[in-house]
Image (spheres, rainbow, N blue to C red):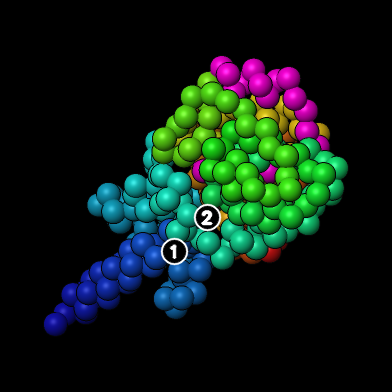
Amino acid sequence: MRASEGNNLLNEERRRAILELLQRERRVLVADLAQQFHTSQVTIRKDLEVLHVRKLIQRTHGGALPLHDGALEDPSLHEKERLHRKEKLRIASAAARLVSEGQVVILDSGTTTTEIARALRNLQNLTVITNGVNIAAELSNSSVEVILTGGAVRKNSFSLVGPIAEETLRRLSADLLFLGVDGFDVSYGLSTPNLLEAKVNRIMTEIAKRTIAVCDSSKFGRRSLSLIVPPTSLQQVITDKGIQKSDLQALKNAGIDVTLV
């Protein structure tokens, strides 16, 4: 076997391994891959470019995502629940510690905010405003007072959207908003695949005194179809330690408090 054939074989083996890792982790970073495969970042970038051209992955700044994690992808609540569960539980625990009795809290629909609802079940004298039907159900037999916005049901996410939800929110105010997102690009903002959901979320940020983004690190470096708000609309972010150093520094430079769990 010629040396070039041997190198090609090694390249293909590494690329298959990258695909398998991406399938498990849902996100890969160039720096991490270079360290794991004991090769240069230049080589890894070339691997990712080859896989991107073959339409096997979606190339992002500093890494890659599965091909189907596109701007229009809108996975169901059930599908999302299975992803990054340990991180979501830690994020929810940290979020719950920020809540005091007597406050009004907004929880948007989503799996991370559902975990926050579960963590708040035993608080007294707490009001939760939500557009998540599943979140209202989680809190229905608890000591928490729940205000459900009303609106049209999005069956994929059990969230309420549209003019009724928007009008209800505009008549309310809250101390805290915990906002889950599908995409968080630190230079662009927080985004979601659904236009109506984005509009409801945007109003939530307007009526809350403090907006806290709650998302695992896989959401960073991603853009979904519809922008909710730019990063400057946030006061705090709670995420896990998998966040890239460049993203973490960008958030801090913007004056946003960051809690790593």
- Quadrant of the snapshot with the N terminus: bottom left
Q: How crowded is mark 1: few (under 14 residues within 10 Å), some or many (20 or more)?
A: some
The residue sitting at 44% across, 64% down in the picture is: 25
Relative to 116, is 12 above or below? Answer: below
253 or 22: nearer the viewer: 22
Identify residue for label 2.
218
Q: Earlier in the sequence, mark 2 or mark 1?
A: 1
What kind of residue is marked 1?
A: Glu
- Numbered tag placed on residue 25 in the rendering: 1
Relative to 159, is 61 above or below? Answer: below
Q: Please identify the residue farthest to the front as the structure is shown.
A: 141
- Numbered tag placed on residue 210 in the rendering: none
Name the secondary structure under disc 2.
Answer: helix
The residue sitting at 78% across, 28% down in the picture is: 173
Q: Please identify the residue farthest to the left as the structure is shown.
A: 1
Magenta range is: 163-183
